[in-house]
Amino acid sequence: MTRVFSGVQPTGHLTLGNYLGAMRRWAAVDQHRADSLFCVVDLHALTVEHDPARVRRLSLQATSLLLASGLDPEVCTVYLQSHVDEHTRLSYLLECVATDGEMRRMIQYKEKTAKVRERGGSVRLSLLTYPVLMAADILAYGTDEVPVGEDQVQHVELTRDLAVRFNQRYGHTFVVPKATVPEVAARVMNLQDPTTKMGKSDESGSGVVYLLDEPEVVRKKVMRAVTDSGREVVYDRDERPGLANLLEILAACTGGDPEALSGVYETYGSLKKDTADAVVELLRPLQERHRALCADPGYVEGVLRDGAERARAMARPTVDAAYRAIGLLPAVADTGAGVALNTAR
Ligand code: TYM
């Protein structure tokens, strides 16, 4: 059976971009057709300045939102990254395969370091090595497919390179995974600045629709979206990025096609209104389920406990095999290790 792995960082409140680019497919498609794991990658949230209490809160909130989006813990595995040591065990081995140059070429690293430096902060070393931890997340599970938004494709490509390199040097150990991205809304843009991604760490939040925004807030944000100076509704990502973003969001919410939808609207106002309504309707059931889950924190904690146990059992054999392959001795009873030491050249 195909193995699917994907994850989300608890660095901020989850957004419409997270949902349309990734989470929605996990729940609607991936969990039903594959043996799948969905991880709240809390260790990744420590790569930038963080408040420990907020990370704890956001980790639980992200888990509840994954469940509210329709992930069924009877069907797939939902867990927190820090509960399964195999991720960090494998990450170190992969650091011994990756190169410094490769890490510095990552687009997200360049963007995020620029932001940190702009604010006069210092860049954590873990921000540089973050794609290696992400590779470990994926490779530990023998993953075939990684459903992500467009911004994560470069990291999955790196993961492929590391898997191939490791296998060539030390013998076949890892499945070489591939990224899958949605046809529409693979990169939802900020409503106030349609040249940048709609991201959870945005400072003002006015161009970002959060999954838990009240309907009136969603409507306001969409109605105030920056569009372009033209009058006609056309779908052109390069020349009319604001409009194209709205058309993509509407298409993703209603199952339509952005190009075809552009022919339906004569004014920006009517497009915005329908887009706002579509987003509100899309989020309504998710928000209702989220409210119900918040009333039952014991359930969410139970899901995480069971999920971590299952994930550990799945990851351990592959990570142990990687330790052997790269040249590390197993910590077994004296006799076995002794023989190996005596016969080693
Ligand atoms: P993160 O937490 O930034 O985002 C989670 C998922 O949402 C997608 N996404 C978007 N898709 C479309 N438009 C947007 N504006 C948008 N914003 C976010 C992301 O592409 C992602 O699929 N490094 C990852 C987390 C991670 C991971 C992994 C993912 C860690 N280990 C292993 C897959 C496999 C990240 O920061 O995602």
Image: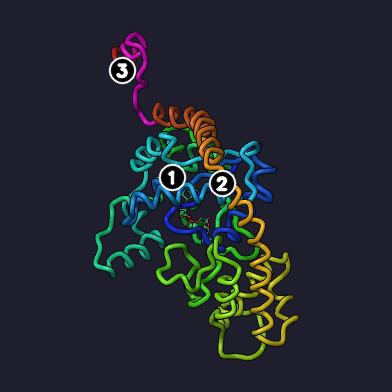
Tell me the tag on residue 162: 1
Residue 336: say if magenta.
yes
Residue 224: say if magenta.
no
Height in image: 81 above or below 271? above
Where is residue 21? Give x, y as percent: 58, 60
Where is residue 263? Give x, y as percent: 74, 81
User: Does the beta carbon at disc 1 come under 8 Å from ligand 1?
Assistant: no
Where is residue 340? Give x, y as percent: 34, 15
Occupied quadrant, residue 216: bottom right
For disc 2, the neighbor class at 10 Å (few under 14, some 14 to 19, many from 20) is few
Occupied quadrant, residue 273: bottom right
Residue tagged by mark 3? 344
> Residue at the location (71% across, 70% down)?
257
110 left or right of 241? left
Disc with the residue nearer the chain's start (2 vs 3)? 2
SS at circle 2: loop
Disc with the residue nearer the chain's start (1 vs 3)? 1
For disc 3, the neighbor class at 10 Å (few under 14, some 14 to 19, many from 20) is few
For disc 1, the neighbor class at 10 Å (few under 14, some 14 to 19, many from 20) is many
Q: Give the range drawn in magenta.
A: 326-339
Foreground: disc 1 or disc 3: 1
> Residue at the location (51% across, 38% down)?
301
Distance between mark 1 and mark 3 Cα atoms? 28 Å
> Residue at the location (31% across, 17% down)?
344
> Residue at the location (55% across, 65% down)?
213
Quadrant of the frame with the N terminus: top right
Occupied quadrant, residue 166: top left
